[in-house]
Image: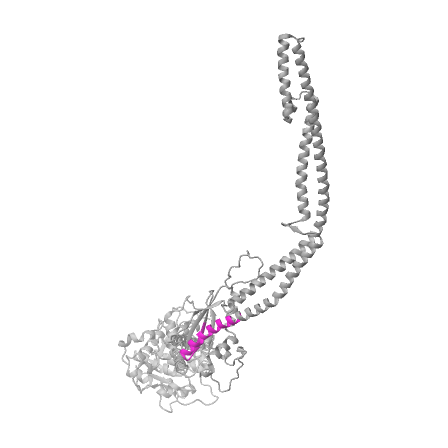
Amino acid sequence: MNTQSIDANEPSPERASDSRSLFPDPRTILAVFRRRIWWFLIPVLLAAAALTVYLLLVHPRYAAEASVVIEPRKTEFITSNPNTAPIADSPPGNDEMDTEVQILTSTAMAGRVAEALHLEQYAEYRSAVPLVYNHKVPSQNPLARKLLQHMLIQRVGLTFVITVSAKSKDPALAARIANEYVQQYIAAGLDRKNSAAETTGDFLQSRLDELRNGAVAADAAVQRYKVQHGLMSAEGATMAEQEVSSLNEEIAKARADYAEKLGRLNSARSLAGQGGGQDLQTALQSPTIADLRSKEAEASRRLADLTAHYGNLYPEVVRTQKELSDIRTQISRELQRIVASLSGEAQIAGSRLSSLTQSQAQAHGQLASNGVSQIELLELQRKAEGASAIYAAYLNRSKEMISRKGLNTTDARIGTLSGVPTTPVSPNIPLAVLVAILAGIGFGCAGVFVAEYLDSGVSTKSDVERRLRVRYAGAVPELKSTLDGMRNVQSPQDYLIDHPNSAFAEAFRSLRAILMLRGGSGARVIAITSAMPREGKSTTSICLARTFVSSNMRTVLVDCDVRRRSSSDALLAEGSQGLLQYFRGETSMQDSLVKDKDTDLVILGTTLAPDVGHDVMTQANIDRMLQDLRPLFDVILLDTAPVLALAETRDLAAAADSVLIVTRWRKSSRKAVDAAIELLLHAGARLRGLALSRVDVKKFASTGPEDTFSYHKKFAGYYVN
């Protein structure tokens, strides 16, 4: 719905939704904080007070920090193989580190420390009730849980270092607790090691006798089995194995000898059958044959020579032929003898080979029989070797445990020990101050936000134009706020006359200028109203009327609020009833008007209430009144009743040329004002705008950074208050 301008030449401002920028104006935020300064300061002051009380009441506490380093774990195991390489030391994993932290934070560890330091002697740990101790069970120490409340034990990142921090009111006690804690941790680890070593030694000792007897019994079983099954051995092999091996060697030699002799025999027989004999002689290398061959060659040579010289019949030739024949006969006999000798040797070699082969068959049978028994023997030997190896390993381990007794070390070492701290860690004054400042600022901002959010009043020009969507007509300051601390005993309407150059008077001149922004001529009827009572409507009407008069404009102020009559009570003498007499027709308009005693302002009003049940503000009376006043005055101001209170106000607003709504700054409900505006618009009223009354100009940007009062201090030289 649109507002209506005072004439046709002026554009009508729409009650449209406002366009907002992406970010709020910093000046607007600053203005909000200036307006809500106490909502911001009170939480800040409360935070400062709380900080002061905290620092006064809390006792300073000191923190001492020691540390332990977890070493790589040494893996020890029993092995029978002396050549087995030892397993490399493994660094502790995350689960192991967490386990050590849990051990440090256990009540058992805290109980050891409490008992070692006799913490019951210190005031922090002293109890009015007698404490019952069980020295055999450290975890049941009555001070263990209380001590843990003052401890902070944690792993440093992903390192193998665990820090132990102790807090106490006594710095020396804090250092003692931290150092004793890490020392007791090392001592507890050493106790566990010694206890485990004793347990292991007892176990090894109890097992040694059993293992020794088992090893002896296993060896005896092996020897008995060997004797029973003829498996006695020498140089790592059984007798059957040695016999088979020896027979194999003999058979190989006999077989080679037989083959050699048989080959020589066959060769001799072959050569002898051929009749030549040369190759046989060369092959057998016999001295006799060699000699006969030499003689045969000599005889053949002589025979050839004789035959060549003397012929075949020469006696020497015949004798030589006979000699040669005898030699050849001897060679043939010698060859036969050699063949017979080779044949005998071959038979002997064959017989020996056959004998050895039979012996080998018998040895193989014995060896096969021993093989079946050997399987069980090997099983017995493995058992015996295993028993002996386990016994030897346990024996070596037992000797090692005995030699290391009293030399055990833990898998941790003390990293650092704490000195006596010199500065307390609590209260942390810088941190406490920072927290208090942040808390104060945070709660202060929250307070400002809540106050601004819950504020349902109309405070700024932005509230008027963006939320109520009507024209902002200006602001009327609270007179006291414009005096800069000076005392004032005058009413606002009287101060306006005596101080025409004041900031207060200038505000009404600005309001007058806004109401008079139109062309044309003729009397202007201006209705001044409000949504609720006590919003400064009547005071604004009187001051505005006197402002019009000061500019030589004929002005009449009509007090239309006949039920409250604030303007009439302020300007008219007691018993005046001109308005009522005019409406009843008892007097004329001229006779009903009363002139202001201090200015040329004319007032039409009444100080008396109308008769009960008699409605004087009828539409006919309003039209007749305005018809009579228009020829007489340039400006007709109608001081009406609140819009939400009486319906007659809407009739007066509809009859006026323009309507000014007066709303008390930061007091009037925005919803009530919005409802009043809707009623006026529905009645056909022409809204000139809305003015804020009783504005405290001392508050920075009280009506918003876009209004003139945001800069009133810069114009202080222009005003005479």
**Front residue (pair 626, 44):** 44
On the image, the x and y values in percent for residue 388 come to: 61, 59
On the image, the x and y values in percent for residue 17 come to: 45, 69
Residue 632 visible in rendering: no
698 sits left or right of 108 in the view: left
On the image, the x and y values in percent for residue 427 come to: 40, 78
- Residue 638 occupies which quadrant of the picture? bottom left
Residue 346 visible in rendering: yes
- Residue 258 occupies which quadrant of the picture? top right
Query: In which quadrant will I find the C terminus?
Result: bottom left
Q: Up-down: is 107 above or below 349? A: below
Q: Which residues are magenta?
A: 164-192
Identify the colour scheme used: one colour
Q: Up-down: is 141 above or below 278? A: below
> Principal SS element in the magenta part?
helix
Residue drawn at the location 62% of the way across and 66% of the way down:
209
Tell which residue pokes out farthest to the bottom in this image.
575
On the image, the x and y values in percent for residue 393 come to: 58, 61
Q: Up-down: is 354 above or below 123? A: above
**Front residue (pair 221, 661):** 221
**Front residue (pair 485, 87):** 87
Residue 548 is a magenta residue: no
- Count of numbered badges drawn on the protein: 0
- Residue 252 occupies which quadrant of the picture? top right
